[in-house]
Image: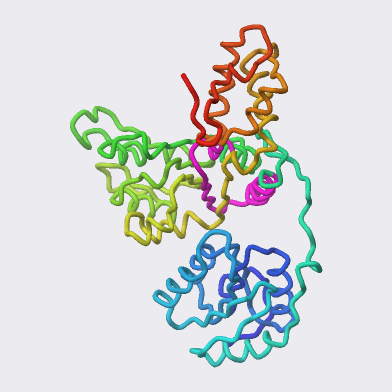
Amino acid sequence: MTTAAQSYYTPDPAVIVASANAAVRQQILQRFHSLRIRAAEALGGADAIGKLESSECQLLLLDGRLPDLDTQDVLRTIHSRFPGIDVLLLDEAGEPLLPQEWRSADARQIFQTVAQWQMPSSSDLPKPDAVGETLPGMIGQSACMHRVSRMARLVARHDTPVLLTGPTGSGKELVASAIHELSTRSGKRMVTINCAAIPEALLEAELFGYIRGAFTGAVQSHMGRIHAAHGGTLFLDEIGEMPLGMQAKLLRFVDRGEIQRLGSSDVFRVDARVIAATNVNLAELSRQRLFREDLFYRLAVFPIDLPPLAQRRSDVRLLAEHFVQKLGGGRGRISAEAESALERHSWPGNVRELQHVMERALILAEEEPIQPEHLGLTNLAAGSYVA
């Protein structure tokens, strides 16, 4: 094992440290650096698997609590795809656990050093800012939304692929737009593709483009939407709805930045940052072979999960007031009784449902303050409302 001192981000690390806790990662990386051992960091399970594919890593330090994938699923994937790599789990305190067996003598030697470390306790680790600046266009001061804002601002500086997850109506497109606006690509286009809205027969032509005569009706050449995002950002909404056959073609672009138009043998290189969004569990779809595993790992390098509105009730009043001012031209007002009813509602349709409810209430209330009866919320527990 070569032990020449190199950067933490060397493309050929001997060790990869996978944890969502930046403080733990930096503590471990600094110690490896002081020992002149090549080490790199991974932000989660998908990122770790992606780095294993392009390195000669001998040891993976894996946090037992990952932000994106189940740790046991990651272990099964690694043992299946990378049988020569040793995995060292970190417990809740960030301390290494002894594996049952070793495949590599080098990994065993590294462990003998790692096992002597006294990892910092959670109280010793630096704390993230309790209050941070929200994203452009985002309304909310809840702790979970500050976390989303912080992660989005951090990744916006890089071209790392982002996977936005969360229920329908939770604001995934807004976060994608904010990441683009905060990036160095903000001067270029953000091209949005709703993978569920384009018929499968037309999807390839829309994504990759075509040349004249490629099929019946192709009277002139057409540049695809991926090509149109060159220099900017490509937002793949509802990526879980993309047909399997199309996923293989998309993988080539995500992996190599290459596209090929229908009817042509010419290959174009496109420089576009990829952000994908889904309201389904892509990891579970991958296990069921309904979504390509390799594409999932390449899209989920930096996952950001958006909470449902039911988990951010402190933001309901702020959002409601925002929609009333926006839709009512500054004339609307919400009564205290209506605010209380809004905060008790379960909001199965999330922020989008709240917007529609406030639009309807403004119409019913006319020039008067909005009352509970204008909201039409009849079953607060079930989240249903009358027409």
Please state, as top left, top right, bottom left or bottom right, where the N terminus lies in the image: bottom right
Q: Residue at x 68, y 35 (%)?
A: 315
In the depicted view, which residue is nearer to us: 236 or 327?
A: 327
In the depicted view, which residue is nearer to us: 44 or 364?
A: 364
In reply to whether residue 283 is colored magenta, the answer given is no
Q: Is residue 141 left or right of residue 72?
A: right
Q: How is the image coloured?
A: rainbow
Location of residue 207 in the rendering, given as x and y in whole percent from the top left corner: 36, 40
Asked if residue 316 can be seen in this view, the reply is: yes
Q: Residue at x 56, y 77 (%)?
A: 60
Depicted 58 relative to depicted 317: above or below: below
Location of residue 166 in the rendering, given as x and y in whole percent from the top left corner: 52, 45
Location of residue 326 in the rendering, given as x and y in whole percent from the top left corner: 64, 19
Q: Which residues are magenta?
A: 146-174
In the depicted view, which residue is nearer to us: 149 or 214?
A: 149
Depicted 223 relative to depicted 131: above or below: above
In the depicted view, which residue is nearer to us: 57 or 302?
A: 302
Location of residue 105 in the rendering, given as x and y in whole percent from the top left corner: 54, 93
Depicted 216 relative to depicted 288: above or below: above
Q: Residue at x 64, y 13 (%)?
A: 328
From this viewpoint, which residue is outermost toward the left?
216
Q: Residue at x 58, y 60 (%)?
A: 67
